[in-house]
Image (tube, rainbow, N blue to C red):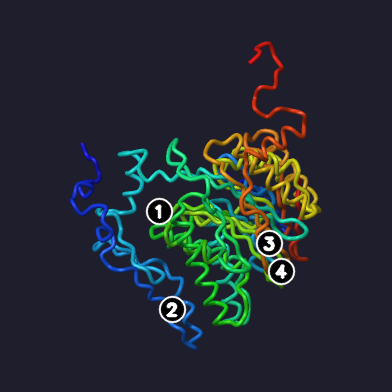
């Protein structure tokens, strides 16, 4: 019987220690600042994957690969051997939509590990820079790391070209990173929302298959179908900012009510059309919002409405 | 899951594609244009993964632009189709582009419109009518029944509208919007349905 993978490395005494997986420090080689305009071409080359010594050198970083003959098969076969291993939960609800005055970005704050709620206070909006926001769904590490890397690339672009990077280019950088790591198990479902003075506010969806689409309304995560329900029924281009914020909160709130993997607090950001963003709500408790909404309709909101034969 | 189909007459060609970008059980976007303009007289309708579709279209568009700047004139329609096919064929055993496409255009030299059917292996065939994906099952017979020699543009548009109706009636996946592009000697006209 061919097990396909030798998982003996799990039994080694040094397993779990920081040095085990990455012997070399992650050196930020980074692109050097030069006046050579051809410099740019080398920056986004395909990852240099050397499977003999088990590492990927790319974007100035050195990542160790899984200790196996065929690391790209490793991620797939892991699913057969241990379905719960490396099973990144997309337990989240994030949404963003464009409207007349910019973009509203609203996210929940729950992180789950199986049935255990690891945290109700996660920050799923990553502030890339003063005019770009990225949302997080899927693997938190992947999203945080690569969006921080994106922030670095945006700054380098600004320094080289004396102008702010366009949202289309920024989202393409992220999508190209996902493309070079195709098949290596990245897990990210992210929305890049930003604003520049030339084109106003723009919203892109980027995911780990390197899908990149521009759109007016997106929701990502396990709670997204529920959020879509509220958004699609009430969305209009001509919302006022107040109505738009309320819509975002209501959509996240409804999603967290139905989806067990979403919850905690709602965080809301507003990207304006003039090249900046503001944090509208840092934490709005979903429970309070739920009862407020139900009570405003004359209902109790706790399931004990009192209709039907069974008096609870 | 993308639907792409087209029909070609003597001096006109029409291609149509659905406009849905899907993710698991949801529609991420329902107004996506999957028919890319290669230049004023040629279009490429692509069915396949979003990522590969965008990358491949971008690559072919840029390559054709480069040819234009390098040589001072645009690549012919049949040469464009051959070039695209060669790119797909060399990629299949290295890093395949998972895309199937139709290339339609108007050749100014001999004043004829042509339609080409390509798939991700690098197959190339000049056709009068064709379709990719599930659309093949539903629209092939409709296209066959409408097609005749010396079809007029209006008959072609009727045919495409009937194909769309058939897809919306019988195909399980709902595709509410379609983009239709009509190529004639006057250029490319874009229409949307739904």
The reply to the same-chain question for discs 3 and 1 is yes
Q: Nearer the viewer, residue A67 or A84?
A: A84
Task: Using the image, name the chain to which the residue with label 2 belongs.
Answer: A
Residue B24 percent coordinates (x, y)? 55, 42
Q: Nearer the viewer, residue A229 or A285?
A: A285
Tell me how far mark 2 sits from mark 1, CA to CA: 26 Å
Tell me how far mark 4 sits from mark 3, CA to CA: 13 Å
The numbered mark at residue A271 is: 3
Regarding residue B7, the answer to whether it shows in the image is no
Disc 1 crowd rating (10 Å Cα; few below 14, some 14-19, many 20+) is some
Which residue is identified by label 1? A183
Residue B171 percent coordinates (x, y)? 64, 35
Task: Using the image, name the chain to which the residue with label 1 belongs.
Answer: A
Work out which quarter of the rendered image holds the C terminus of chain A and state it: top right
**Picture quarter containing residue B175?**
top right
Which callout, 2 or 3, points at the residue further toward the start of the chain?
A: 2
**Picture quarter containing residue A160?**
bottom right
Q: Secondary structure at mark 1?
A: loop
Work out which quarter of the rendered image holds the N terminus of chain A and state it: top left
Q: Secondary structure at mark 2?
A: loop
Which callout, 2 or 1, points at the residue further toward the start of the chain?
A: 2
Task: Using the image, name the chain to which the residue with label 4 belongs.
Answer: A
Regarding residue A68, the answer to whether it shows in the image is yes
Above-or-below relation of B74 to A269: below
Which residue is identified by label 4? A199
Above-or-below relation of A5 to A159: above
Which callout, 4 or 3, points at the residue further toward the start of the chain?
A: 4
Asked whether, in this view, residue B92 is left or right of residue B74, the answer is left
Which callout, 2 or 4, points at the residue further toward the start of the chain?
A: 2
Asked whether, in this view, residue A201 is left or right of residue A170, the answer is right
């Amino acid at each position: 019987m061919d097990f396909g993978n030798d998982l003996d490395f799990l039994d080694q005494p040094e397993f779990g220690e920081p040095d085990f997986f990455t012997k070399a420090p992650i050196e930020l080689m980074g692109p050097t600042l030069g006046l050579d305009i051809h410099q740019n071409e080398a920056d986004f080359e395909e990852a240099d994957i050397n499977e003999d010594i088990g590492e990927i050198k790319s974007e100035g970083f050195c990542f160790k690969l899984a200790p196996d003959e065929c690391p790209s098969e490793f991620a797939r076969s892991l699913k057969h051997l241990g379905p719960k291993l490396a099973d990144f939960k997309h337990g989240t609800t994030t949404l963003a939509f464009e409207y007349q005055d910019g973009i509203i970005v609203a996210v929940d704050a729950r992180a789950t590990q199986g049935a255990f709620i690891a945290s109700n206070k996660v920050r799923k909006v990553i502030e890339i820079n003063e005019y770009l926001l990225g949302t997080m769904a899927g693997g938190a590490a992947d999203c945080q790391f690569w969006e921080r890397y994106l922030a670095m690339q945006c700054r380098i672009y600004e320094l080289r070209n004396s102008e702010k990077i366009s949202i289309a280019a920024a989202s393409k950088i992220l999508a190209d990173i996902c493309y070079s790591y195709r098949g290596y198990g990245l897990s990210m479902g992210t929305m890049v929302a930003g604003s520049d003075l030339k084109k106003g506010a723009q919203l892109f969806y980027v995911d780990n298959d390197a899908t990149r689409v521009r759109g007016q309304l997106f929701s990502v995560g396990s709670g997204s179908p529920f959020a879509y329900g509220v958004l699609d029924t009430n969305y209009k281009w001509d919302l006022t900012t107040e109505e738009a914020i309320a819509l975002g909160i209501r959509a996240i709130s409804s999603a967290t009510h139905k989806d067990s993997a979403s919850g905690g607090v709602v965080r809301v950001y507003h990207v304006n059309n003039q090249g900046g963003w503001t944090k509208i709500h840092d934490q709005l408790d979903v429970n309070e919002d739920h009862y407020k909404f139900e009570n405003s309709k004359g209902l109790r909101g706790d399931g004990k409405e009192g209709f039907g034969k069974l008096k609870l | 899951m993308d639907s792409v189909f087209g029909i070609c007459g003597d001096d006109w060609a029409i291609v149509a594609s659905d406009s849905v970008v899907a993710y698991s059980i949801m529609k991420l976007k329902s107004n996506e244009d999957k028919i890319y303009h290669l230049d004023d007289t040629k279009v490429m309708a692509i069915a396949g993964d979003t990522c590969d579709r965008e990358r491949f279209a971008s690559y072919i568009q840029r390559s054709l632009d480069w040819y234009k700047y390098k040589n001072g004139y645009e690549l012919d329609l049949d040469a464009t189709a051959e070039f695209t096919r060669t790119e797909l064929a060399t990629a299949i055993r290295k890093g395949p582009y998972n895309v199937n496409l139709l290339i339609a255009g108007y050749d100014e030299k001999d004043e004829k419109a042509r339609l080409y059917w390509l798939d991700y292996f690098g197959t190339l065939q000049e056709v009068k009518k064709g379709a990719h994906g599930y659309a093949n099952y539903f629209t092939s017979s409709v296209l066959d029944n409408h097609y005749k020699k010396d079809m007029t543009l209006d008959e072609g548009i009727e045919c495409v509208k009937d194909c769309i109706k058939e897809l919306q009636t019988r195909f399980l996946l709902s595709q509410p919007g379609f983009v239709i592009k009509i190529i004639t000697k006057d250029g490319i006209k874009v229409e949307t349905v739904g």
